[in-house]
Amino acid sequence: MKVCARRFNIYFALAAAIALMCGGCRTEKPDEKTVGILRIHLETVPGTTEISTAVSVLRSDPLAVTIGHDPVLTEANIIAARVIDVPGGFAFEIRFDGTGTWMLEQYSAANPGKHLVIFGQWGNKVEDGRWLAAPLISHRIGDGVLAFTPDATREEADQLVLGLNNIAKKNQKGVSK
């Protein structure tokens, strides 16, 4: 009878040690819960406030732009995001799914000379989001990849990219089911 009690204690101690090492064995890491928001609006002519609004983009040299209320692309259309190094700093590279590629191509082909106005949010607080960029449309973008230099720190950019990629993974899992 003492042999069984000792064996039980050894198994219990082993199970307790494994539980402590796992730390609760969570299925999601905290980084996997991080989400990001990216909304791309198209510049419009100033007009009625029901369909457009004026925003200020860039903090150091503000640019006032009138945009349509509804975004033309969102984080739901993203399949991958990354921060790339460019001379003098870094940039975002956003790759869109089939629908997003088609939308980007259509809007960029039909609106040369206008701006794509980009809003990003990388945290749970309102302060963790702002208008990041307003790249000028100079040509048709047919490959589904949008690259731009954001008005953000490298840490903010990394956090936004992490959140956007988490959303993209969740969207891809939803499509494959």
Image (cartoon, rainbow, N blue to C red):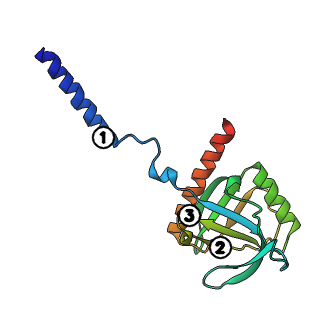
Find out whether the residues at labels 3 and 2 contact each other: C-beta distance under 8 Å.
no
Q: How many residues crowd mark 2 within 10 Å: few (<14), some (14–19), many (20+)?
A: many
Q: Residue at x 76, y 76 (%)?
A: 53
Q: Amino acid at mark 1?
A: Met
> Going by the picture, which residue comes out furthest to the top?
1
Binning the other alpha carbons within 10 Å of mark 3 as few (below 14), some (14 to 19) or many (20 upward) gives many
Which residue does the numbered mark 3 point to in the structure image? 122
Q: Identify the amino acid type marked 3.
A: Trp
Q: Residue at x 13, y 16 (%)?
A: 3
Which structural element holds mark 2?
strand
Identity of the residue drawn at 23% across and 25% down:
11
Quadrant (top left/top right/bottom left/bottom right) for the N terminus: top left
User: With 157 as the anchor, is 174 left or right in this view?
Assistant: right
Residue 116 quadrant? bottom right
**Is 48 on the left-hand or right-hand side of 40?**
right
| First in sequence: mark 2 vs mark 1 | 1
Residue shown at 62% from the left, 66% from the top: 120
Dot label at residue 71: none
Q: CA distance from mark 3 to mark 1?
A: 31 Å
> In front here: 62 or 83?
62
Q: Which residue is mark 2?
A: 131
Label 1 element class: helix
Check disc 1 and report the residue beneath it: 21
* Nearest the eye: 155 or 175: 175
Mark before the other along the chain sequence, 3 or 1: 1
Q: Amino acid at mark 2?
A: Trp
Tag 3–tag 1 contact (CB < 8 Å): no
- The image shows residue 133 at horizontal and vertical percentages of 67, 73
The quadrant the C terminus occupies is top right
